[in-house]
Amino acid sequence: MDIRIPENVNLILDRLKEYGSIGYVVGGCVRDSFLGRDPNDWDITTPLLPEVVKNLFNDYQVIETGIKHGTITIIIDNEQYEITTFRIDGEYSDGRHPDNVHFTDRLEEDLKRRDFTINAMAYNPDVGLVDLFNGMADLEDGVIRCAGNPFDRFHEDGLRILRALRFAITLGFRIENQTSYYMQTCKGFLSYVSKERICSELCKIMRTQFPSSFRCLYNCLDLFYCLTPYFEDKIHSAHTLFEHHAVVESLIATNRDDDMIVRFALLMQYTENPKDELMDIRLDNASIKSILHLLSNKDKYKDISYEEVERKYFVRRLISEIGYRDMRRLFSFWKSRIYVGTPINKFYFLKTITQMEYDAGIIVTNNDCCSLDKLDISGDDLIEIGYEPSKEIGDVLKLLLDQVLHDPYKNKKHWLVKWAKDLKENQEEIQDSN
């Protein structure tokens, strides 16, 4: 079985060979290659000590990524390639890092320390595939299985429990029974893992292209109780989330980042303090902001009119308030809620949202004014009219923007100046009457 190896990776393997040694591509790049996917990165393992590897590639930029653990990074054509010495890990007293490592010249010893069979395969063009744990069979059968003793693997690094879940969900695989059993038995080891690493795994899970495989996650919900106390009341929310995406898989046709935002919003839709929960799991601020946008607008679809003028005003207003991308996420969020729920006039709402999606595309294509910076009038123009420099100018600009959101063809300076003058005259009349 052959793997198509990139030119720069072959360069590394050839140089190791010329030195009289050998290198193997290993782990995720082997797995993804046999799945017909483009690997995100290429990791190489070799019996050479890191100092030797460093000198061997001294004509390239070398980063001592984790030289204590045998890893250095070579940069070729602005791409990074990690080269790690065959090693045997010592005890994991902190449930996260090995206390020490021992370098070895035996590939099999290095493969023994890896997490799952599908990640414990190595490949060299001259040697072929090295598969000591039948990872290829598990890859073909769609199985996630620990390489070696599951208790040992999860005791070494509790994050592997979530990694098992993530691989099962993102690949659409099932988890082998013994591995699944020890995921539950060892779930306490998650408490040793930083919330940042846990959040990274959760985000990868939420980006899956296989929504129906979220049922695997439903069977492991109590794993989340170890992550944050907020997840203890998520059974109903999570079950609803999985049902949403099993039903509306074809609707969430955006991209993986958008899917993640929509799914977190679905998970948090019945929560009293979603911001606190999302901050507690260390989700990034931009994602939290987008999720809160969806939640704050979760029921607004009930107020939408199908009448064209009001519908388009609603769309421009949304773009103005939350931006085009979050608005598209909101449409997916609404569709998910409507499809699974049983609102009155379900198909009317779905028809309206579909029309709004079309409207939004036209509005963006036409470059309609949906923000203050696109108004054909400025604060300086208002000062010339007679407004005093103050917060009032910002308020007047917002009022003018709202007029333009109703009718974008009126985003012309003469119209806006007239409205501003009329507004000022009305304000002065009110002040005089008082």
Image (cartoon, rainbow, N blue to C red):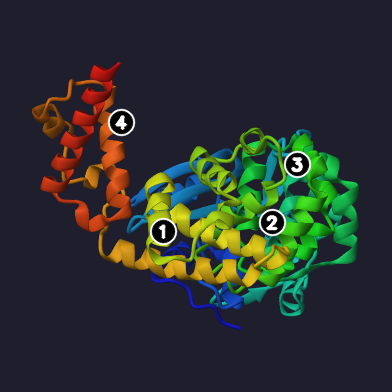
**Earlier along the polypeptide chain: callout 2 or callout 4?**
2
Disc marking residue 325: none
Which amino acid lies under the numbered mark 4 shown in the image of this protein? Answer: Asp
Q: Quadrant of residue 132?
A: bottom right
Q: CA distance from mark 3 to mark 1?
A: 67 Å
Q: Nearer the viewer, residue 331 or 191?
A: 331
Q: Return the residue at label 1.
A: 310
Q: Which residue is mark 4?
A: 395
117 or 210, which is in the foreground? 210
- Tell me the amino acid under the disc marked 3: Gly
User: In the structure shown, which secondary structural element does the residue marked by tag 1 occupy?
Assistant: helix
Q: Residue 91: tell me if it is visible.
A: no
Circle 4 SS class: helix
Q: Measured from the top left, where is residue 317 in percent x and y?
A: 40, 50
Mark 2 lies on residue: 110
Q: Is residue 151 left or right of residue 302?
A: right
Mark closer to the chain start, 1 or 2 = 2
Q: Is 41 situated above or below 221?
A: below
Where is residue 373? Give x, y as percent: 24, 43
Q: Which mark's residue is nearer the viewer, 1 or 4?
A: 1
Q: Position of residue 213 (x, y in %)?
A: 73, 68
Q: Which residue is identified by label 3? A: 90
Mark 2: amino acid: Asp
- Residue at mark 2 to residue at mark 3: CA–CA distance: 12 Å
Image height of 68 relative to 79, above or below: above
Q: Earlier in the sequence, mark 3 or mark 4?
A: 3
